[in-house]
Amino acid sequence: METDRNHNSPDIYESLERVTALLQERQSLTDLGYEATPEQSHSGDQNTAALKILASLQALLDPMHPADVAYILEALPLKDRLALWDLVKADRDGEILLEVSDAVRETLIEHMDDHELVAATGQLDTDEIADLAPDLPSEVIADVFRLLPPEEREQLREAMSYPEDTVGALMDFDMVEIREDVTLEVVLRYLRRLDELPDHTDQLFVVDREQKLQGLVPINRLLVTDPDVTVGTVMTREFVQFNADEEAAEAASAFERYDLVSAPVVDDSGALVGRMTVNAVVDYMREKTDSEMLSAGGLQEDEDIFASVWKSVRNRWAWLAINLCTAFMASRVIGLFEGSIAKLVALAALMPIIAGIGGNSGNQTITMIVRALALGQITRDNAAKLFAKELSVSALNGLIWGGVVGVFAFLIYHNWHLGLVMMLAMMLNLLLAAFMGVLIPMTMDKLGKDPAVGSSVMITAITDSGGFFIFLGLATLFLV
Amino acid sequence: METDRNHNSPDIYESLERVTALLQERQSLTDLGYEATPEQSHSGDQNTAALKILASLQALLDPMHPADVAYILEALPLKDRLALWDLVKADRDGEILLEVSDAVRETLIEHMDDHELVAATGQLDTDEIADLAPDLPSEVIADVFRLLPPEEREQLREAMSYPEDTVGALMDFDMVEIREDVTLEVVLRYLRRLDELPDHTDQLFVVDREQKLQGLVPINRLLVTDPDVTVGTVMTREFVQFNADEEAAEAASAFERYDLVSAPVVDDSGALVGRMTVNAVVDYMREKTDSEMLSAGGLQEDEDIFASVWKSVRNRWAWLAINLCTAFMASRVIGLFEGSIAKLVALAALMPIIAGIGGNSGNQTITMIVRALALGQITRDNAAKLFAKELSVSALNGLIWGGVVGVFAFLIYHNWHLGLVMMLAMMLNLLLAAFMGVLIPMTMDKLGKDPAVGSSVMITAITDSGGFFIFLGLATLFLV
């Protein structure tokens, strides 16, 4: 919370512009043949200038929050980014690495030697080291383990043992634990001996001798209660707790639902093993949203905007390849009807309309069903109702928009048979879209796959090939 | 936080199943001609059964958190939903209305009379009433204003005056304010007189006589500091604060960046007017994500999964209409080349490949640029670099995938001229997609529009029509 008094994001944008300007000045000096680091100081005006630039950069960076430095690093092209990274004081490396995006973190870590990396982890808590671990070389991890005191080594081993997207992977170990039989007076004296409470300490955890969680005491209750009563009489015995193996998404929605700031994490035996805080939830939600947006847009992962061309091409590869396959399939469906198209070339101009609108409509259905599945709103009882509803919506849309495209076809080609076929094909493709739009995500969910991934590609493939087949098939039967 | 000890979302799913089963039992009794409410009690076995069902439902609902009741209401078809709504104790109506989605809230409010609605707001804080206000009939709002004490009336007026998506619309008024010149002892005594501190009170706000914000005292510091010192000596003078007119998104990213639990909101003169908490931020983030997902899927707004067919049709209307227009446009572009297609019918089968992959590639670029814009990573200095990078990625992709489709065309139609034209068309359409994929969102951002909305429709329209034009144009020049 120790940031500039008048926090305001425009300030960060200004800092970014200033950093960019200073780096450019520095670059133009370097281009003239002057190189300056605080250690070596030649004489000469340009050299003084270079040192001045360095000092200004340092003065700008030093008071900044690690998250703000991370933002600036992300917004700089690779060369400038690494130049700036060299200037960041070594004792903040770790905190900043935690804040940058995965893609940018990779570029920074590549630029550091093992010794620097081990030093960087020295500033971090064990749960934070565990967050970085997947990006660190294995020698570095081994060194880190060797240097930690035994208790923390155990914590790190535990934190690293939980799969991504579980509560265990998001928890930290900064709990304040108290016993049930002491008075609040004793608790208050204990707290006063700590210099500072861990961030996000809104409650204390009451455990017994076996470390089993018995209850919670909200910090605020400490302030408004008579200090002579015992912990046992004021503690809350009904509360939200998570199991370390639970899915992070479940925990996040509990935080959202019950407005939590922190919550205890227990193991299968009910022993307190860690704590989850709302800031971990906020970060998790942001990352989840980001990766959903990226995969909806056809990107495999978070892409550094200044990634090399080759890296970007690989990031977009898989999606384009899949789409190419479905496009080839659709193309072969059309190929089946080349004879009909040769006889009535208007079919070629009209067919993309049927396929396109079918795809849009199918994606609307999928979006709704995927969301309802994520919220747990779909049960055995209401699934049939949903099918009926989506099919009705499509039938109505088919009637309306089928009519519109039918009239469009008639107006342009003065052929009312063609108009009727257009209308019928539109209706059938929208029904197909609705049916598959409900079936695909529900089946994926049943099979234990994430319905948000891939549903959209599948429905588009089906409405494209299906739309072409329906329209050209009907046209072949009735028109040519 | 007063929820079931073993919170676990599966419990909620079970509750939903139980509620559904009970409502069905009740329905089958009603179908037999028995109607039971707690007030009227006929004799007879079925009647006792009906009362028993009611009692079970009541016993299930009463201990549930409002957010959990809201979840169950959302997952029930309209008729069951309203039946359950009638059973919810009147003194929880307000809290539950706050928790349900906008679409479901509408259905519940329609079912309540003005008197019930006014009573429901009686349980809420003024900032919560302001959240409900847009959905309430104006007579209800007028009544609510009349019934509030003057100070709260002023708060409500203020809360309602801020546009959606500003800090003012998300803030609450539950601040604990203290003076700079008193000792912590005095503060502690003052707090002890309050029965309970407001939720999410992690810090106290220090204001002067003109209500100007001077500093903050973290609650945790109260616990670890000698009570004899004055507020002025321990308060933090450097902190994050927001202006009530500021955009909510800016505030949300500051909460995320600096791991805040609460933050003061001031007016232009620096006077404390409210407080923003992390739970408001979490709700805001969730809503924002939801609406982005929905609009990416082509839905105008949050759709109740049990909305009437007619309501759903209207919710999906706009998007389909827009897409129909762009499809008609693409169709007319093809229409221009009907002569060429008649001569070489393979063109009809191949053209959707060019258009489709162009659309995918354009959407990848847009996704990346929209994200970089949202994160503020694009500056005047790096825009040119981004254009160059995206065009290079497309050129490389064009070479690779253009080659693949060229070979595909050759293998099927044994015409290497056709293969070359396919390859060239693919490259050109991918370059068009990259160029427009950078240009469209950056232009929208420059014009002050949200680049996430509509960019995808525009790029698809361009790569469809453009792809058909490029491919069929090249074919007309070189092949027929």
Image: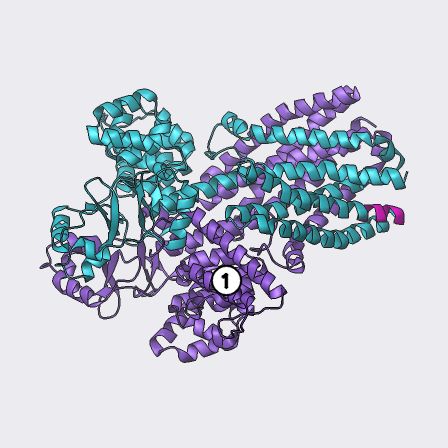
Chain colours: A cyan, B purple
In the image as oriented, which residue stretches furthest toward the bottom?
B146
The type of residue carrying mark 1 is Ile
Q: x, y percentage for residue B264?
A: 31, 59
Which residue lies at the image location 64% right of the left edge and 59% below the top edge? B308
Q: x, y percentage for residue A177?
A: 20, 45
Name the magenta segment's main secondary structure: helix
| Residue wearing tag 1 | B53
Residue A26, above or below B242: above
Q: x, y percentage for residue A32?
A: 36, 26
The one nearer the camera, B83 or A280, is B83
Left or right: A402, with B227 as reference point:
right
Is residue B380 visible to us here?
no
Q: x, y percentage for residue B20?
A: 53, 56
Q: Quadrant of residue B178 in the image?
A: bottom left
In the image as oriented, which residue stretches furthest toward the front?
B44
Residue A212, above or below B165: above
Is residue A265 visible to us here?
yes
User: Could you tell me which secondary element the residue under label 1 belongs to?
Assistant: helix
Residue A320, above or below B183: above
Q: Quadrant of residue B198 in the image?
A: bottom left
The one nearer the camera, B356 or A391, is A391
Residue A230, above or below A276: below
Residues shaded magenta: A416-423
Q: Chain of mark 1?
A: B
Left or right: B158, with B450 as reference point:
left
Which residue lies at the image location 41% right of the left edge and 30% below the top edge? A78
